């Protein structure tokens, strides 16, 4: 039976930002829960290798995600497997309503909902999704051992995950719509040095072709207009993230890209609602700043709760 549960602080999403917020809120002796629909750890849990988180020269993403989770739980963060469908205000309560029917109420909510992969929206993408079209190298890479793999995009995710996929593929094509990568220089250099990687520049995918599985891609060179076919066993698409804000039923302020705008306390345009990590409007989206955001959000939420409690104490 559905329950109406009360906490001090409710965190939506258990990625690095949400888990770190949970750790700090729990250490402040607050009753705090993080609601997560998949595995705790967020994007990091499905990232191959992490080597830019201070203190860890090299660690598997899944292992780092597990360390974050265990650390936060050790201090008292509760984690519930729940899919949040709605976030809204009910008087002073900040409420998360879940697909299970359960309702989680707090005096503050911290949104750490990250993003979802952007789709290419080309013919064949949807039809062949799970049949050679993938958005997650660590989840699906091993299925394509010794096959030719295509990766679409030129950002950190495409170039880093393309390099990771050379563990499995006989060859990896990274197909980018321009002739310059957006990825960090160190990530670029590693891919340039990798003999299994070949770049296809200035090209976009027009269609993903195959009957029951991906067989080839039709490419269009945007400079010359030349069309060509490339035989591949799989195509991994990393063309960016779109922030997950659809569950927010209040009129919250977003930037032009749809990311949640906060002040430097991670406070959104709605009192008692905070945001941290990839869903927040900011220059950089890294684990390092997500945990910083989470720390600030938890401390700011704690101060907000104290103010509410003072207000009520003075009324009595
Ligand atoms: P991103 O930085 O937004 O890059 C998306 C890439 O896809 C760009 O190269 C873009 O081309 C290309 N693209 C976009 N739409 C396209 C389309 N319709 N067709 C073809 N190509 C298209 O996204 P991301 O790589 O997923 O990274 C998201 C965030 O996570 C970034 O802030 C990134 O720094 C961070 N991240 C960091 C790491 C790390 O530090 N190790 C790893 C993964 C992600 P243009 O360049 O022409 O725009």
Image: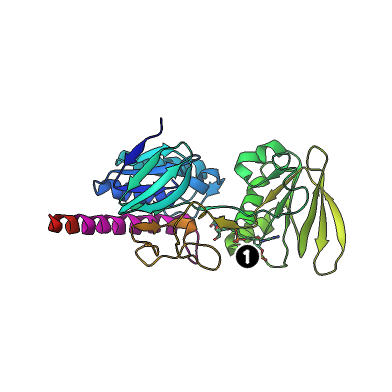
- Majority secondary structure in the magenta region: helix
In this view, the residue farthest toward the top is: 1
Q: Position of residue 300 (x, y in %)?
A: 30, 59
Q: Quadrant of residue 221?
A: bottom right
Q: Position of residue 48 (x, y in %)?
A: 57, 45
Q: Quadrant of residue 128?
A: top right
| Left or right of residue 304: residue 125 | right
| Quarter of the image where the C terminus is located | bottom left
Quadrant of the displayed image that contains ligand 1: bottom right
In this view, the residue farthest toward the front is: 91
Q: Residue at x 79, y 46 (%)?
A: 232
Q: Position of residue 282 (x, y in %)?
A: 48, 65
Colouring of the image: rainbow
- Mark 1, ligand 1, within 8 Å: the answer is yes
From the viewer's side, name the closer residue of 316 and 310.
316
| Left or right of residue 105: residue 36 | right
Point out the stretch of residues depicted in magenta.
281-309
Q: Position of residue 253 (x, y in %)?
A: 46, 65
| Quarter of the image where the N terminus is located | top left
| Left or right of residue 58: residue 67 | left
Dot 1 alpha-carbon crowd within 10 angstroms: few under 14, some 14 to 19, many 20 or more: some
| Left or right of residue 128: residue 94 | left
Residue bearing the label numbered 1: 182
Asked whether residue 285 is drawn in magenta, I would say yes
Give the mark count: 1
Residue 60 in sight from this viewpoint: no
Q: Secondary structure at mark 1?
A: loop
Q: Residue at x 38, y 67 (%)?
A: 263
Rendered view: 278 above or below 48: below
């Amino acid at each position: 039976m559905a329950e109406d549960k009360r906490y001090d602080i409710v965190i939506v999403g258990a990625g690095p930002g949400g888990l770190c917020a949970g750790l700090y809120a729990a250490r402040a002796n607050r009753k705090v829960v993080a609601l997560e629909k998949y595995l705790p750890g967020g994007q990091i849990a499905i990232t191959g290798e992490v080597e830019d988180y201070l203190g860890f020269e090299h660690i598997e993403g899944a292992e780092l995600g597990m360390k974050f989770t265990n650390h936060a739980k050790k201090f008292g963060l509760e984690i519930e497997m729940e899919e949040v469908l709605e976030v809204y205000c009910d008087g002073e309560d900040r409420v998360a309503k879940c697909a299970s029917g359960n309702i989680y109420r707090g005096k503050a909510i911290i949104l750490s909902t990250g993003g979802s992969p952007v789709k290419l929206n080309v013919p064949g993408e949807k039809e062949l999704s799970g049949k050679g079209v993938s958005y997650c190298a660590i989840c699906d890479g091993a299925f394509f051992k010794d096959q030719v793999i295509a990766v679409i995009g030129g950002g950190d995710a495409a170039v880093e995950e393309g390099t990771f996929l050379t563990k499995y593929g006989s060859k990896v094509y990274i197909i980018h719509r321009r002739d310059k990568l957006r990825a960090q220089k160190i990530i670029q250099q590693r891919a340039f040095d990798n003999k299994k990687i070949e770049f296809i520049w200035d090209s976009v995918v027009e269609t993903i072709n195959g009957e029951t599985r991906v067989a080839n891609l039709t490419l269009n060179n945007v400079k010359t207009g030349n069309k060509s076919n490339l035989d591949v066993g799989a195509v991994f698409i990393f063309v960016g993230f779109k922030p997950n804000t659809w569950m927010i039923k209040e009129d919250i302020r977003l930037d032009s890209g749809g990311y949640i705008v906060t002040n430097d306390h991670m406070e959104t345009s709605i009192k008692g609602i905070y945001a941290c990590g990839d869903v927040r409007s900011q220059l950089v989206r890294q684990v390092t700043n997500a945990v910083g955001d989470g720390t600030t959000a938890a401390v700011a939420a704690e101060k907000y709760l104290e103010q509410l409690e003072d207000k009520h104490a003075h009324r009595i």
